[in-house]
Image: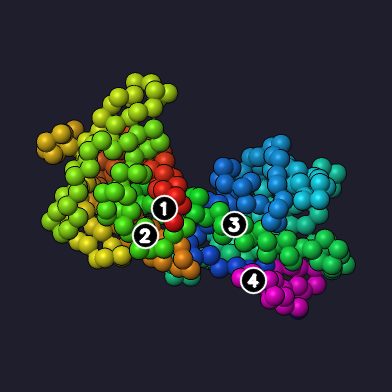
Amino acid sequence: MTTHNAMGKTTATTAGNELTVTRTFHASRKLVYKAWTDPKHLPMWWGPQSFTITTHELDIRPGGVWHYVMHGPDGQDYDNKMTFLEMNAPEQISYVHGDSIEEEQFRVNVTFEEQGQATLLTMRMQFKSAEILEQAVKEYGALEGAASTLSRLEDQLPAITFAQALGHTFKLERIFDAPRELVFKAFSEAEHLQKWWGPQGWTLTVCNLDFKPGGAWHYCMKCIDKNQGDFYGYESWGKAIYEEIIGGEKIVYTDYFSDSEGNESQDLPPSTTTLTFEEYEGKTRVVSLSQYRSAEALKTVVDMGMEQGITETWDRLAQHLQAVQ
């Protein structure tokens, strides 16, 4: 077995006809798994630096095919075809890799292993012979290509919001490319909240914030996008009551729909949300856990499009953080 460790954060070993590549990501395995299985994100990071992709077919499921052309920085095109074999979320993916002429050049098994708050990703690539693997390493730069690709995966993670409704809990996770102090300020200072809170096409017209335990945030979101049809001009009022604040680390609050006077709406369910902030290498991992009174109450807000709304809201936060750094 030969170990190749001069590849940044990626380690690779070769043994016989197998190439094994590993890298640890400071994100939950569900978020990393989503990067591999969401058709919006997979083509954005796949391939070495400076390579781009044109997708002809993308069907991410067992038996599904991803047919794409990879464009090299030298102008060369590379036909690729990937056929998915197994998908066991969020633990494992296997596929065969080839092209339109030779559909199976090698097989790959990818595993996602939880390591505390991080994820160990392992790719095991099995070639048809040790000689073919050696050719891939020496002539085609397989080791460097794998390391560069996984580096791009790490860069893509801040563009992904993971959302999951389980029982009466709604979980969100995202990595923001900004230091924790700034991200915490974005959630706790009115001058920041006014710039990003709300889905695309919405703005805060009222933002009365008293950020302290027992304090409240009373706000109004208004749709200003004419392309959103009947929502254009619509106002949505909300109120948060802060229960616990640990500077830079944690915010706990009760959140409910309200009227313009701050009275709680009886038509829509409230929630208690815990936000945690964890910094790693200059980036910040934010996890939001919202507890509803029942699974039925959570379903009410999920059916209203909450996941899309929050994803768009956190997209705006990412854009705001980039703008103020």
Q: Residues within 10 Å of mark 3 (few under 14, many from 20)?
A: many
Identify residue type, mark 1. Answer: Val
Does the CB distance between marks 2 and 1 fall below 8 Å? yes
Identify residue type, mark 3. Answer: Leu
Mark with earlier residue (3, 2):
3
Query: Which disc number belongs to residue 8?
Result: 4
Q: Secondary structure at mark 1?
A: helix
Q: Residue at x 42, y 41 (%)?
A: 312
The magenta region covers: 2-20
Q: Nearer the viewer, mark 4 or mark 2?
A: 2
Badge 1 is on which residue?
A: 324
Tell me if I can see residue 105 in this picture: yes
Tell me if I can see residue 110 in this picture: no
Q: Secondary structure at mark 3?
A: helix
Q: Marks 1/4: CA distance?
A: 29 Å
Q: Residues within 10 Å of mark 4 (few under 14, many from 20)?
A: few
How far from the left and from the top, in percent, is residue 45? 62, 52
Q: Residues within 10 Å of mark 1 (few under 14, many from 20)?
A: few
Q: Residues within 10 Å of mark 2 (few under 14, many from 20)?
A: some
